[in-house]
Image (cartoon, rainbow, N blue to C red):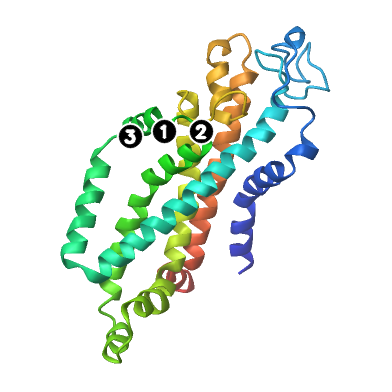
Amino acid sequence: MRRLRWYLLLPAVPVIVAVAAALLAPWVAPSSPTSGNLAARLRPPAWVQGGSVQRLLGTDLLGRDLLSRLIWGARISLLIALAATVLGAVVGSLIGLVSGYYRGRVDRVVTKLIDVQLAFPFVLLAIAVIAVAGASIPVLVIVLAIGSWVGHARIIRGLVLSLRERDYVQAARALGARTPRILFRHLLPEILSVILILATFDVGRIIILESTLSFLGLGVQPPTPSWGSDLRDAAAYVRQAWWTSVFPGLAIMVVVLGVNLVGDALRDALDPRTQSRARA
């Protein structure tokens, strides 16, 4: 048990730091993330010659403090990732639950819809939706949720197809239990751990997708700070000012890696098959 707790704690450290920075951004950020000083543009980090302690990670092409933008960018990126993950998990899990339980025509319609969306490139879908609805954070959350519900629906559907034949479900049906009660009282508790694990992995994936869309100019719009938009602004200065692209890239990599490791740990902790193998 001690080993399991450490396994859960260590990869969660960067995630906890990112969440704390996002929540405390107004108090821990050294300066405003949007106010720039062209006289101080492209200043190096504090440990490099020409750097300053007041600007610990240096400045970008507009003279904005890079550390402040990373801290405020964590708030935007995590907020979008969590909102899209929750929305996609709820919609996908409900669709998978209904599809797997009812089967028949409902299941055929859902599976065809899943196949159509999987065959459609996500970036093209995002471009089409954002071109019609405009680029904003709510639209971005909806687009990312549209891209994430499919994975939940497919896996939950497969689980429910097997669970619906279990004795306790058959007994509840024989006793006259209504369908909503069977779905949410008997089946949903059995798959909650799977939904949690899938949602954890989805957070990291959606952070990457949000950063990709922002890098392409389809996501968070200036002057709102975002890790993806910071990478886009730094693309032309990779050789001249390496820190403008390295630190946002490291923030994305470390946080996504931490989220994925937490997902692995949760899967090991909540999967009965993994626990039985560990005891053996």
Of marks 2 and 3, which one's residue comes earlier in the chain? Answer: 3
Residue farthest to the right, as pictured: 53
Residue in the image at 64% along x and 19% along y: 243
Nearest to N terminus: mark 1 or mark 3: 3
Marks 1 and 2, how far apart in space? 8 Å
Q: Quadrant of residue 60?
A: top right
CA separation in Å, label 1 and label 3: 12 Å
Alpha carbon distance from label 2 to label 3: 15 Å
Q: What is the number of the mark on residue 125? A: 3
Q: Residue at x 73, y 39 (%)?
A: 25
Above or below: residue 277 compared with residue 61: below
Pointers 1 and 3 in contact (C-beta within 8 Å): no
**Residue type at tag 3:** Leu
Query: What amino acid type should be assigned to the residue bearing mark 2?
Result: Ser
In front here: 80 or 58?
Answer: 80
Q: Observer-nearest residue: 170 or 106?
A: 106
How crowded pointer 1 is (Cα within 10 Å; few <14, some 14-19, many 20+) is rated as few
Residue 136 tag number: 2
140 lies left or right of 166: right
Percent position of residue 90, x then y: 43, 58
**Residue hosting label 1:** 133
